[in-house]
Image (cartoon, rainbow, N blue to C red):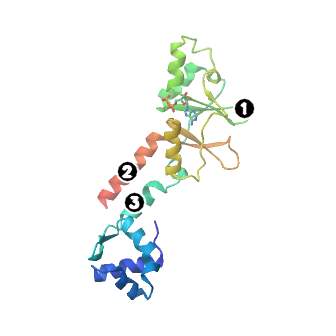
């Protein structure tokens, strides 16, 4: 979160003169108290300033917090997505399961001959198939996958907060990342695991800095 020039000036004034009333801050800036109201509200809301009745504003020194917010949530999907494993729709269920183990992933994306996204197949789809007691070697993944247009996707420009909300809303473990121009062209995979790694890593980094 970036502060405006005026908000930065307010922070400097409070740092130097705390505790200081809103009227005195306004006086230093040559502005009216009313003009400053929304700036002071923002600065107290994000925790940089603390307001105490009849005493005034204090600087809390917590100006790293808004930076952490940016680092955590404003990151784009492009920065955290991974490379998906994409298979042909004719691949057998048996071979698809082998791929899950080989690449240590929870789901595969399925494409057609034109390299367009046509399906997603995950652990639950395989389990459902097993209960049906069918022949894994002779069944193509196309028979058991979730198909377009029922697949929820994102584009690389989305923030991870927006994408994370979609993951939770649809209760799936991953979202295919497709291009803005062509919603069937897969360029990545956003997984819950990858998001979790991102948050833990950011937490470790901020502890060590
Ligand atoms: P798991 O099967 O390991 O629990 P998911 O929760 O991702 O993994 O998948 C649950 C169901 O949702 C499966 O039927 C799968 O095909 C489907 N699915 C997975 N990802 C998506 C997606 N992005 N859009 C729509 N359906 C999906």
Q: Are marks 1 and 3 in contact (CB under 8 Å)?
A: no
Q: Estimate the spatial distance between the alpha carbons at disc 1 and disc 3, rounded to whole Å.
A: 44 Å
Question: Residue at the location (39% across, 79% down)?
Answer: 10
Looking at marks 1 and 3 on the same chain, the residue that comes earlier in the sequence is marked by 3
Quarter of the image where the C terminus is located:
bottom left
Badge 2 marks a residue whose secondary structure is: helix
Question: Residue at the location (38% across, 88% down)?
Answer: 28
Q: Quadrant of residue 18?
A: bottom left
Question: Residue furthest toward the right?
Answer: 114
| Residue 157 locus on image (x, y percent) | 59, 53
| Residue 67 locus on image (x, y percent) | 41, 63
| Residue 59 locus on image (x, y percent) | 30, 73
Ligand 1 shown in quarter: top right
* Residue with the mark numbered 1: 113
Looking at marks 2 and 1 on the same chain, the residue that comes earlier in the sequence is marked by 1
Could you tell whether 61 is left or right of 166 in the image? left
Badge 1 marks a residue whose secondary structure is: loop
Decide which of 67, 38 is in the foreground and name it.
38
């Amino acid at each position: 979160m970036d502060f405006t020039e005026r908000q930065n000036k307010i922070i400097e004034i409070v740092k130097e003169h705390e505790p200081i009333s809103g009227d005195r801050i306004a006086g230093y800036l040559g502005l009216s108290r009313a003009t400053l109201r929304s700036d002071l509200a923002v600065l107290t809301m994000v925790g940089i300033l603390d307001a105490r009745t009849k005493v005034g504003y204090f600087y809390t020194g917590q100006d790293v917090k808004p930076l952490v917010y940016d680092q955590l949530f404003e990151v784009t999907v492009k920065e955290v997505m991974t490379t998906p494993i994409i298979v042909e729709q004719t691949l057998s269920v048996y071979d698809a399961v082998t791929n899950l183990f080989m690449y240590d992933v929870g789901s595969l994306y399925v494409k057609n001959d034109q390299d367009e996204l046509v399906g997603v197949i995950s652990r639950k789809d395989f389990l459902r198939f097993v209960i049906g007691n069918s022949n894994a070697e002779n069944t193509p993944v196309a028979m058991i996958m979730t198909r377009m247009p029922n697949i929820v996707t994102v584009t690389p420009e989305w923030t991870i907060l927006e994408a994370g909300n979609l993951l939770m809303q649809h209760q799936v473990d991953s979202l295919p990342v497709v291009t803005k121009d062509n919603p069937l062209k897969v360029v990545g995979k956003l997984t819950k695991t990858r998001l979790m790694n991102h948050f833990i890593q950011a937490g470790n980094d901020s502890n060590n800095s």
